[in-house]
Image (spheres, coloured by chain):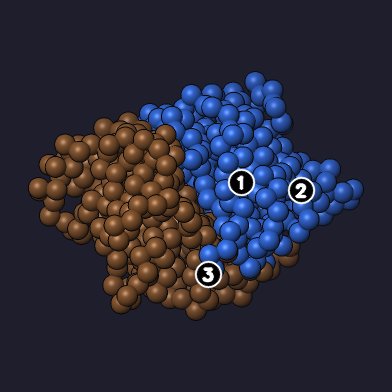
Chain colours: A brown, B blue
Amino acid sequence: MQAMRYDEDAFHSWLARSGTPHPRVRVPIGDDGAVLSAPPGELVVAADLVAEGTHFTSGTDPRLVGRKALARNLSDLAAMAADPWCAVATLALPRGAPTGLARGITEGIRELGAAFDCPLVGGDTGTHGGGVVVSVTVIGTPHGERPVLRSGGREGDVLVLTGAVGGSGRGRHLRFTPRLLEMRRLVAFGPPTAMIDISDGLLLDLARLADASGVGFELEGDRVPLHADAGPGADPEAAFSEGEDFELVAALAPEAWARVEAAWDGPVPLTRIGTLVHEGRWLRLRGERRPARARGFRHA
Amino acid sequence: MQAMRYDEDAFHSWLARSGTPHPRVRVPIGDDGAVLSAPPGELVVAADLVAEGTHFTSGTDPRLVGRKALARNLSDLAAMAADPWCAVATLALPRGAPTGLARGITEGIRELGAAFDCPLVGGDTGTHGGGVVVSVTVIGTPHGERPVLRSGGREGDVLVLTGAVGGSGRGRHLRFTPRLLEMRRLVAFGPPTAMIDISDGLLLDLARLADASGVGFELEGDRVPLHADAGPGADPEAAFSEGEDFELVAALAPEAWARVEAAWDGPVPLTRIGTLVHEGRWLRLRGERRPARARGFRHA
């Protein structure tokens, strides 16, 4: 711990200068904390970190690093059926890193935040002996009456998936769009009984939803759309265990699904991929029904 | 990025098992986000990180690491005249770290959180090639009618300091008590016009408060209590530039100070240490008045 001067002041001064006012934010970055109006009702709070060498490779465009750090959090809010209210970020930077690194990360956070009305209201920076670690916390507010949890699923509910899975590691994990618009469309039909986003693999996150709901699931593997990123002739089971798809899996009562299916018009497709069942974890693939191994993706 | 298994599941399962219910928290750790009641009025949000080798040395008791990460944030809330509502934390851990490390950090956060009614409601963990980085975000709610900012100070205001400064680097920086109780006592007399906590050194943070308020300051150096940690015969000017005291500096109208001075009964002493003046940064020491150099402490 030395009294050496890091260029935090230059960064903070840029941060204050370059910020965009937001009607929700009375005191932005620059004081000991930000001050903003509280949302009515409940708060939904989520936090995620991304670390160099684990969630992105060294040399990744700093804007994409910031973008991913916020996008993961917005995906969590979508899974809770919550709209973003604000975000804060802390940046641990390698000692000697240029101030431009912090700016790039911040710009990536702000750009995605602007697209989803999620102002960046505060944070902290520090240097250390390791690589870049970006931690983002988001505060959200229920889009409907209440947040949607993992635990509300019931036997017989239809499982639906936004978009497609597989191959995210080829670059999509840095650029994916959190499914907030799709969540809002879904909630407009009446809230799903349960929802989760796929961070660690379709099968593993599906198992988490089913476990939390006290039921089992049957995944109809042949119905699951595989993303073009997974490549031609991709192994579906591999795609079901890869992580970072950041698509939503929602459980809907069958009558709700009938209404949604008839009217769904995007932004991305919504596909029926299975059912919540009494118990067990089942995968139906090429006509065969067998126990699903809920292997998932973990960052080493 | 490998599909190797880190013991995140064991940690998360411990986390869920060992949590204490809180009336404010409807859905604790375990879903995609926490759900809690929103405070009335305004939100105050602050975030701080601590990184191994910068804010604490390798081998520091994990509980003290977690404690410090939260304490810095609670100190920010105190400086905003806000009470804690909840906290979230992300932990970047060295690859191969024992699960006990994450537990210890979490216990440190929870213990201090329990002392100040600040439940830990969520977070994230990940491993990486660097050392421990703990990022904490706190959400607070104004203790009085509105938060107290750095910018409300006026010429003629009395500057007061909680506790004493200097020598924090000898260990106090890991164990300091955020001045929430003192903030509440102060606000009960009528809110200060401006307030800040000393993270980067008395002179530097005083300059920030004065700058934000558009005034100058005169620090009466001989009145500033030096902490016993600074050692016998400590150089006051060095103590005014050291960081991490995490005491509060508040600006009060002179008539407010008269009321506070007559009635103040702790928990720690409150000392008049100077005045906000028309302009300039002045230090009065041993009878001599001269320009103050607002050098501060920065983590390298």
Do the residues bearing badges 1 and 3 touch, measured as CB atoms within 8 Å?
no
Residue receiving disc 2: B61
Q: For the N terminus of chain A, give its image quadrant.
A: bottom right
Label 1 or label 2, whichever lies nearer to me, is 1
Tell me the subunit letter for badge 1.
B
| Residue drawn 67% across the image and 69% down it | A129
Is residue B205 or residue A32 the one in the foreground?
A: A32
- Judging by the rendered image, the residue that carries numbered circle 1 is B10
Name the amino acid, label 2: Asp
Residue drawn at (21%, 54%) of the image: A270
Judge from the rendering whether residue B40 lies leftward or rightward of residue B217; answer left or right: left
Mark earlier in primary sequence (1, 2): 1
Label placed on residue B1 = 3
Above or below: residue B218 compared with residue B114: below
Q: Secondary structure at mark 3?
A: loop
Q: Residue at image x 56%, y 37%?
A: B16
Residue A300 pos. (x, y %): 58, 64
Residue located farthest toward the left when viewing the structure as drawn: A262
